[in-house]
Amino acid sequence: GHAVGAADAPVQDWSCMNATSASGSCKSGLPFYQMRSNAMSPTLCYEFCVSKGLDVFALVDGVECGCGATALNKNIWHWKEPPAHLKFKPTLSAFDDDTKICPLRVYRYNGHFEAGGLPYSLLQRSEQDGEYLDSTVLGKTFTYGHEDAPDSVKLQLRQEMEAARGAAGLANPTGWDRDCWPDNCGPGNGPWQGRQTTVPAGVTDRWEEYVVIPFIWNSDIDDTRKEAFRMAVKRWHHSTCIVLTEESATPATPYIKISKDSSGCWLSGMGWPGYWGGQPWYSTINLGWCSDSSSIGNMVHEIGHAIGMNHEQKRADAAQNYNGQGPHLNVHWENIDSTWTPQYVPDFNSYIGSADDGHGDPHVGYAPYDYESIMHYPAGSAFDTEPAGNEGLTGNRAYLTPGDISQILDMYQCQEKPGYVPPLGCDFEAGLCSWTNEGEVAWGTASGATASSGTGPSGANEGSAYAYTEASWNSGKTFILESPALTPTSSYTVSWDYHMYGSDMGSVKFEVETADGTWVELWSMAGDQGDQWSSAQANVPAGSQAMRFYAVTGHSYRSDICLDNLVVTEVSASTTTAQATTTSRTTTTTTSTTTTSTSTTTSTTTASTTTTS
């Protein structure tokens, strides 16, 4: 055990950053964070630590949550041997009242790992969290903040791109009375020029045109980085008309080169690179410390730069009043090193909105400041937000915000096809598609096994991912996954695969909403169905407004309910009746339960479960 922190201690505990192996185990091998709550519970502590990518969590004297990592959690340790003073040791000294230290109740995440770390779908880490974790592991202050290209690289690229830009006759106007595509309403070299009406492979038939940007790998890029970058690419084409396509040879048009020439994570060459000396030129995304799935958000950030997005805090209205808007930040210039000040100096070319570009224009006028943008730096000593309550929004590297998406839709004039309806089917490979969470607890997606032993599948039935209800800490909770609005004059045939394995299994229903707002059950299943995927089908009658899966977990963690391969087919507008057919395919689940000893108790855990800068 170790001494509990003060009641007003910061959540990020930096005391272990300067510790050494000579001083023994730092904080009992729980070196990360010291989160306190007057409602502390294993559930709360689990959710906090797992969201940071940490697989060991402990209650310290019942009031404080501390986090650690095992050697299996390679992403935390940068794929190196964990420092002895930071690694959690399952056997600790016995508790003694005379020692004046607090007993621990320790738990361990018992689920699967993806690419050396906890599944990306479980993470909710900000850039501040990444800096804190890496600083503690490396034993020195480590700052992502300015994932910028080396000066020599920037100078060369700037000269070449300015020449290409001048030859193309392009200019950078300012303000929000600017035309977007085919003009430039943002910073850098303007929108990428390659557009096509043909739907690229693996992309939804949604947009009038797609902006196709080829990219190639440097020979030094490893498979772990490749897989993480591919996931970052999906985040963009899932929400916009931007599609990055992987090429095996140097493209005949401008492209992005993915390298890891240095330790930084940065983009050199914002926007369309153009041609140089008659040859297609390229931008470079360097994946130095962006090395695995824990950095997907940073990779999404770098792609944002590549397609023409600046840091949000460089907007003209960020730190000053600009045409009646702002300021949104109070920048403390005295706290910023001179080499970093350019990241806060206003760039009047930055996107801040646009003029009316005509029919179908996704956005017209001023664009509200987005504190939560994936392109915004985290708050800290460099600035305060105005209002102060927005400070916690900054530094997001978990998801694209509506503001991020709106900016790219506007800059590239991504226009939906007339009559486009969000696809109702979903393979869950890139999330929940157009279905939304409406219950007490959210459905998630996973690949491999779920986090708990004795429940859930060993993997998806088709592809690599599926939707699931995480029952750990969520017993007896309602999970509702609801479709977009249906076409009232159409009927539908719906089929899906489901997996309901666990001794305390709950139930799931498939329901449709009638015209009067009543939900009607068409299919249901309850109880343990064995370690196998089964199939079901239902007919949705015309006049239905929406459909949903309504799941309720059982009374313990052994009740993960899973869905996969959801197929929805629109058929003629005739009255249909419900039907369900079931087939089964046996799979094997391989998760296990871990027993952990602590200074005061032995705790058997089944707690499993569960970008430039």
Image (cartoon, rainbow, N blue to C red):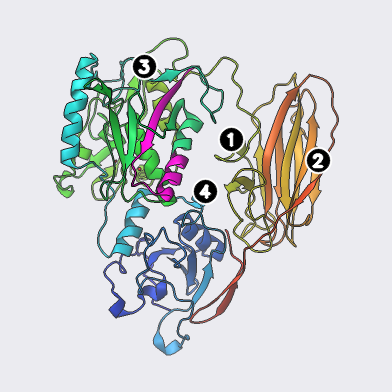
Q: Amino acid at mark 1?
A: Cys
Q: Residue at x 54, y 16 (%)?
A: 417
Q: Nearer the viewer, residue 59 or 448?
A: 448
- Please tell me whether mark 3 sits on a helix, a strand or a loop: loop
Q: Earlier in the sequence, mark 2 or mark 3?
A: 3
The residue carrying pointer 2 sits among few (fewer than 14), some (14 to 19) or many (20 or more) residues within 10 Å by Cα, namely some
Q: Residue at x 61, y 69 (%)?
A: 593
Image quarter hosting the C terminus: top left
Q: Residue at x 46, y 25 (%)?
A: 241
Q: Earlier in the sequence, mark 3 or mark 1?
A: 3
Q: Earlier in the sequence, mark 2 or mark 1?
A: 1
- Please tell me whether mark 1 sits on a helix, a strand or a loop: loop
Q: Which residues are magenta?
A: 209-232
In this view of the protein, can residue 510 be seen by the observer? yes
Magenta stretch encompasses residue 124: no
Q: Which residue is mark 2?
A: 523
Give the CA distance from mark 2 to mark 1.
22 Å
Q: Which residue is mark 4?
A: 121
Q: Earlier in the sequence, mark 4 or mark 1?
A: 4
Q: Earlier in the sequence, mark 3 or mark 4?
A: 4
Q: Amino acid at mark 4?
A: Ser
Q: Amino acid at mark 3?
A: Trp
Q: Earlier in the sequence, mark 2 or mark 4?
A: 4
Q: Is residue 11 above or below residue 292?
A: below
- Residue 5 position, x and y percent, is 37, 70
